[in-house]
Image: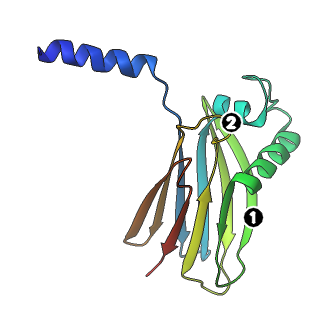
Amino acid sequence: MNPLITKFFVLLILFFHKYYVSSTLIDYSNDSQTHQVSLKIFHDDLEKDLGYKTNELDYSDYVNTNTIIKNYLKNNFKIYSKEGKLKLDYLGFERKNDLLIYYIEIYNPNNLKNFVVENKILFNSFKNQKNIILYRKSNYKKSFIHTYDNFQSVLSIP
C-alpha cells in the first residue's frame, strides 16, 4: 500500500479515537526525605468519572472541589506498604488548561523500601484508560502502566 495512504488512515484513526491517559510522577526528595506525587488527569474525564457534566465542577470553589477530588483519590489512588504505615498528605490541585494536577506528599518515617501503587483513576468511566506511573529516586527510575485489569504494581526501591 502506498505509504502516504497508510499515514492518512493512521491519522484518521487517531483523530476519531480518543485516548484516555493519566500520568503520575513520584519523585523522592532528599531535602525533605519525602515522596512527592503529582497526578495529571484531563479535567473533563475526571468530571465524568465523578458524575458531573463537563465544566460542571466549580474550580473557583477551591475548598469544596479539593475535598471532592481528595475523596475520589483516596478511593482510586493508593500507595501503601505491607511493611508499615505511610502518611499521605493531600496538598491540593491546580488546573492548567485541560489538565488537573493534584499534589500528594508521602512521609516514610521508617524508610520502607517496598510499596504497592494502586491506580484505578477513571476506570469507572473508561475501560480502556491507561495510567502511567513513573518513579524517580536519584539515578533509579521505574515505570508502570496500569490498566483496568492490571491496576496494581509493587515498587521495590534499592
x%, y% of residue 105?
A: 67, 64
Give the answer, above or below, for where 81 lies relative to 120.
Answer: below
Q: Which three-letter amino acid code belongs to the residue tagged 2?
A: Leu
| In-image side of 127 versus 87 (left or right) | left
x%, y% of residue 68?
A: 83, 44
Q: Quadrant of residue 29?
A: bottom right
The C terminus - image quarter: bottom left
Q: Secondary structure at mark 1?
A: strand
Q: Which residue carries the number 1 mark?
A: 89
x%, y% of residue 19?
A: 48, 31
Question: Residue at (37%, 71%) from the top-left corner?
Answer: 139
Please tell me which residue lies in front, 33 or 47.
47
* Crowding near the residue tagged with mark 2, few <14, some 14–19, many ≥20 C-alpha atoms within 10 Å: many
In the image, farthest residue toward the left: 2
Please tell me which residue lies in front, 14 or 96.
14
The N terminus - image quarter: top left
Q: Which three-letter amino acid code belongs to the residue tagged 1?
A: Asp
Numbered tag placed on residue 46 in the rendering: 2
Question: Residue at (75%, 58%) from the top-left corner?
Answer: 90
In the image, farthest residue toward the front: 149
Q: Secondary structure at mark 2?
A: helix
Q: CA gap, disc 2 to disc 1?
A: 21 Å
Question: Residue at (64%, 41%) from the top-left corner?
Answer: 122
| In-image side of 15 versus 41 (left or right) | left
Give the answer, above or below, for where 149 lies relative to 29.
Answer: above
Please tell me which residue lies in front, 31 or 72.
72
Numbered tag placed on residue 107 in the rendering: none
* Crowding near the residue tagged with mark 1, few <14, some 14–19, many ≥20 C-alpha atoms within 10 Å: few
Question: Residue at (63%, 42%) from the top-left corner?
Answer: 123
Q: Earlier in the sequence, mark 2 or mark 1?
A: 2
